[in-house]
Image (tube, helix red, strand yellow):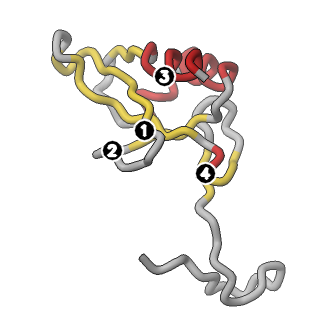
Amino acid sequence: MVDAVRTTSDSSVPFGVPSTPVRTCVGCRGRDEQSALLRVVAVPDPDGGTERWLLVPDPRRRGQGRGAYVHPDPTCLQTAIARRAFGRALRLPAGASTDASAVQERWAEQ
């Protein structure tokens, strides 16, 4: 894999220095390096069809489909749930419910 290299005329970053991916937290809307955020993907609930989705942590960032990023902070997770930001970021069907218990359990383990 080839590292991303700066190609703009921004002189604050030396030319040829690899850049790190920056993502936005769906909870606090803060921007941070990809490595500082947890990727979350949605999988259909086996019992709920397309109306209910399970939010699953994807720490290796290799899961299929669209992902949403959140800081590893319970406050950011609760804010994202309250704002219903996961459904929009993951482009879930309108009116679909999400279950973030797997993400909450991951933080409880740490």
Label 2, on which residue?
Answer: 63
Residue at image coords 27%, 15%:
52
Q: Residue furthest front?
A: 109
Label 1, on which residue?
Answer: 58
Which of disc 3 and disc 4 is earlier in sequence? 4
Give the residue type that dot 2 points to.
Gly
Which of disc 4 and disc 1 is earlier in sequence? 4
- Find the distance from the CA under tag 1 to the CA under tag 4: 12 Å
Q: Which mark is residue 103?
A: 3
Q: Which mark is residue 35?
A: 4
Q: Secondary structure at mark 1?
A: loop
Residue 38 in the image, given as x and y percentages of width and height: 55, 38
Please say if 27 is above or below 60: above
Q: Quadrant of the C terminus?
A: top right
Residue 77 in the image, given as x and y percentages of width and height: 60, 23
- Find the distance from the CA under tag 3 to the CA under tag 1: 9 Å
Please say if 21 is above or below 18: above
Q: Are marks 1 and 2 in contact (CB under 8 Å)?
A: yes
Which of disc 1 and disc 3 is earlier in sequence? 1
Give the residue type that dot 1 points to.
Asp
Q: Secondary structure at mark 2?
A: loop
Residue at image coords 64%, 72%:
19
